[in-house]
Image: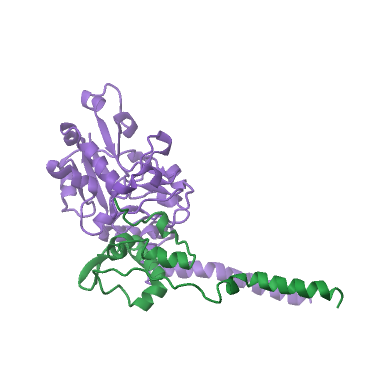
Amino acid sequence: MYDSGKIIPGLIIFVLFVTFPVWYNHGDAGAVPKPEMPKNAKKCVLPVAQMRAEHMQLLLDWRDEVLRQGEWGFITIDGKPFQRSLQNACLKCHTSKKKFCDKCHIYAAVNPYCWDCHFARVKK
Amino acid sequence: MDKKRREFLKIAGISTLAGLGGTAVIDRLATGASPARARAAYEINSLSPAGQPKEKGPAKAAAKTSQRLGLVIDMRKFNANPGLAEKCIKTCDFLHNIPHFNNKKDEVKWVWLTGYENAFQEHSHYYRNETLEKNQVLLLCNQCDDPPCVRACPTKATFKAKNGIVAQDYHRCIGCRFCMAACPYGSRSFNWRDPRGGLDMKHINPEYPTRMRGVVEKCTMCVERVGIGKLPACVEATGDTKAMIFGDLNDANSEIRKFLKENYTIQRKPSLGTHPSVFYIV
């Protein structure tokens, strides 16, 4: 190989540079976020694992059912009636967007556009 | 070779004709309606949930079984109660988080007041009486039975709900403003700026979303309140004055139909054929 003296150190530097985030953090992905669970409610719409994985699909389904198909009915969770609504159901128990929603969204670097219009109550 | 090409062209021509004509014939047989009537039924059918068979049949039959929510606005009562119209507007503004920029260009309006000559251009303005001269008319979206905005919308962001309300789905709005051009009543507003800039975020209704920059919004006759059995906010704000009467125009026994039977009412620009569901007594 011509110029192997330059190419091989160059490749090594390149690989080190690309894997910088991995070895800088010692192969640790950082602490898993712990969103704050609501204190006054035990049950969610779906089991926790399912909510964690599919809450975005659930919200989209709710949006279509309520807004497009006009099914503005209530659902019952843990004996209490709730509207199928982000602001009027989810955020009624998960009162802090910062301590619940944002925790994972920031960790996963996702920026859901829900919050362009929907909002959590601002503390006075 | 020549013969083969001839055969091929014949078969191709016949199958094209069968393909084009065949589907049309099958469609017509299946719906049992002529194309013109099928088109009229389109609005209602397109609202049936995905996966379910669409309602078939002529538009008139479907319209009779469905609701058509409407309003009567009695300006005599508003004139007798000064400040009532402003109360309606304030209630609506708060409940729907409507921004204010103190700037005509960026104005977002759902319910508003204007002079008689602007509201009813088709009616005579010569030698108007003093009441019309002095008082303003309360305007809102007419919730047309044949809404031109819905026809203009390329994404079906605005659509006619089952109860007759012309609803607006901000999730789908792309901000093309075709609906604003199509609406003959100026009932639609565009969010030129982020609406949160025109709101006091500490004193807004936490149960209703704001909008985002670049979508069109309008009065939705409180589709979110009507859906859970409440009255529209403005109607509720008028209280016992009976200045606004809300009800189903398709129900011959409803309060609004009785009122319409007993009183002379007018609509805005009836000649355009949009069939407004908001009636006025001026």
Expressed as whole percent of the image width and height from the top left, the position of residue B170 reads 40, 54
* Total marks in image: 0
Residue under the point 56% across and 75% down:
A26
Q: Is residue B19 above or below residue B230?
A: below
Residue under the point 65% across and 74% down:
B11
Q: Quadrant of the C terminus of chain B?
A: top left
Q: Is residue B199 above or below residue B124?
A: below
Between residue B201 and residue A60, name the one nearer to us: B201
Q: Quadrant of the N terminus of chain B?
A: bottom right
Chain coloured purple in the rendered structure: B
Between residue A91 and residue B266, name the one nearer to us: A91
The answer to whether any part of residue B21 appears in the image is: yes
The answer to whether any part of residue B2 appears in the image is: no
- Quarter of the image where one finds residue A43: bottom left
Between residue A58 and residue A109, name the one nearer to us: A109
Residue under the point 15% across and 44% down:
B239
Expressed as whole percent of the image width and height from the top left, the position of residue B62 reads 31, 61
Chain coloured green in the rendered structure: A
- Residue sitting at the far right: A2
Between residue A104 and residue B5, name the one nearer to us: A104
